[in-house]
Image (cartoon, grey):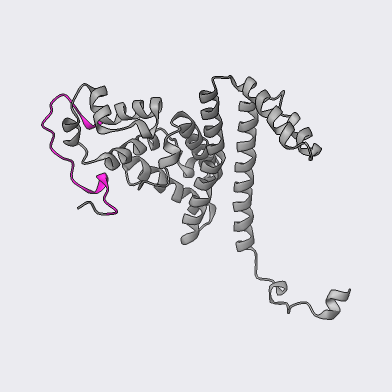
Amino acid sequence: MQQPFDSVWTREPRASRSSTLSREQIVRTAVELLDAEGVDALSMRRLGAKLGSGATSIYWHVAHKDELLELVMDEVYGEITLPDPAVVGWQDAVTVFAYGLRDALRKHPWAASLLSTRPSLGPNAMRLLARMTTAFEQAGFTGLELDYASAALLSYVLGATAPEIAWQAVIDRSGLDGEELVTAVHETVRRAARDHPGLVSRHEQYRDLDMDVTRAISFDFGLTCLIGGMKARLARDAAPFTEAHDAAPFTDADREQ
């Protein structure tokens, strides 16, 4: 019986009976299939057909589909750069990672749905986690705050990138280009928000903007705010304990002044 927290990375690799099919080939081809058709289209049978091999040959390398998904996720993690924080500083390291993850998710939209539903225990994921921990240690976080900081960064990138992925999916399904779809959406918003002219006016400002540039600026804005908030948190924790911290709560007389 499969255990709830089994992982392909915690068992010994199976000895393959195929001299022509490698696990690396399987993973690369699975990524190609996922990029082209999404998670729902992935099956061992379809993957075997794309490889020109039966599904049985794949099972010599992976026990089941969940293991395959772990492997392809680590392949995506392998595309992400995270420079040494000791060389570039923690803020630059975090920024490079955030943009690298955003780029990887935009390139492989299916990965966003797997990011928080599959264990990230592969060598590429471990490399990124180790360097991310080093970066936040360099910043001054300790203990559980190291995990909180990493979780905040991952949550931001995933949350900011998911609407971009969803918008691209809408474009792909509609058969329209981005500009045509923006015009169509604007007309819908104009009708839906007719009782809120301020919202219509603000939405109108987006009609002549390059949406790719706008989204990139928006991503950078949020990331800068997140890092700024982390710096403020560290500065607050490092501030000397002054008499103001020990002051008694406001009295009624204080409130009346």
Q: Is residue 178 above or below residue 76?
A: above
Range shown magenta: 4-25
From the viewer's perspective, tell me whether residue 86 is left or right of residue 32. right
Furthest residue toward left = 17
Determine the residue positioned at 50% across, 56% down.
148
Q: Residue at x 61, y 57 (%)?
A: 233
Residue drawn 29% across the image and 42% down it: 66
Left or right of 120? Residue 219 is right
**Does residue 250 lie above or below 148 as drawn?**
below
Q: Where is residue 126 in the image (x, y as percent from the top left)?
A: 36, 45
Task: Give the side of residue 17 with respect to residue 176, left or right.
Answer: left
Give above or below for 137 relative to 195. below
Residue 18 in view of the camera: yes
Question: Was residue 219 drawn as part of the magenta stretch in this picture?
Answer: no
Res 185 → quadrant: top right
Is residue 88 visible in the rendered structure shown here?
Answer: no
Closest to the observer: 196 or 44?
196
Task: List x then y, in percent, for residue 204.
Answer: 75, 29
Q: Position of residue 218 (x, y in %)?
A: 64, 36
> Foreground residue, 69 or 154?
69
Question: Which quarter of the figure is the C terminus placed in?
Answer: bottom right
